[in-house]
Image (cartoon, rainbow, N blue to C red):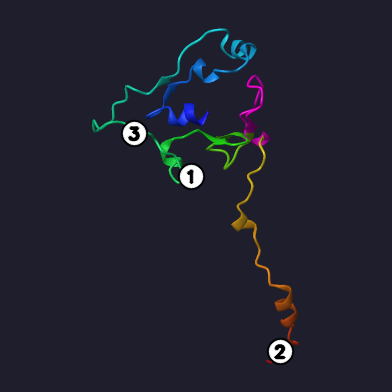
Amino acid sequence: MVQHLVDGVAVGWDELGTDLLAGAPPQVVTALTGGEQWPSRTLDHLITPDGSPPVRMTVTERTAADQDVQWGYVLRSEGIEVISVPHADAGPVIGWDTDPRTLFSDHPAGWPAPTPSPLATSTRTVPRAARAAVSPRPRTPTRR
């Protein structure tokens, strides 16, 4: 998938074709395409405002908001993560072995909650030996 979608294109995709389904069972291909075949098409005819050659758009967490990105797809070893950028920090990971005819909801309420980063959830712990050495001092009376 990475070879086809990422490495196999210079700038981006205009349309993904049935070549993406190479090796899929014929009944799946027929169900998804109605039996038709068409090639993927890349974005080859882009014209930039300054006339320079177009370059691949790189999207990061910092740049997504400025690039009017609505959806993000992260290819993971266990499956593809589908992220609705305006509504969630993370989306469901759909396993590579999932039947592509499965219906999915695009409503983020049905998705798992994002997992907090380890830094956000970690608490500072004092080693047991250090805790024993720290004993509370007796309270002194308040002076007025």
Q: Point out the tag, 1 or 3, that comes first from the N-terminus.
A: 3
Point 74% across, 83% down: residue: 136
Point 53% across, 38% down: residue: 86
For the record, the magenta segment spans 94-110
- Up/down of 132 relative to 107, above or below: below
- Up/down of 104 relative to 33, above or below: below
**Residue 11: mark:** none
For discs 2 and 1, the disc positioned in front in the rendered view: 1
**3D distance between C-alphas at marks 3 and 2:** 70 Å
Q: Which residue in the protein does label 1 denote?
A: 61
Q: Which quadrant is the C terminus positioned in?
A: bottom right
- Residue furthest to the bottom in view is 143
Q: Residues within 10 Å of mark 3 (few under 14, many from 20)?
A: few
Q: Secondary structure at mark 1?
A: loop
Q: Which residue in the protein does label 2 denote?
A: 142
- Up/down of 17 relative to 1, above or below: above
In the rendered image, which quarter is residue 43 located in?
A: top left
**3D distance between C-alphas at marks 1 and 3:** 19 Å
Q: Which residue in the protein does label 3 denote?
A: 55
Q: Amino acid at mark 1?
A: Glu
| Residue 69 pos. (x, y %) | 46, 34
Q: Amino acid at mark 3?
A: Val
For discs 1 and 3, the disc positioned in front in the rendered view: 3
In the rendered image, which quarter is residue 47 located in?
A: top left
Q: Are marks 3 and 2 in contact (CB under 8 Å)?
A: no
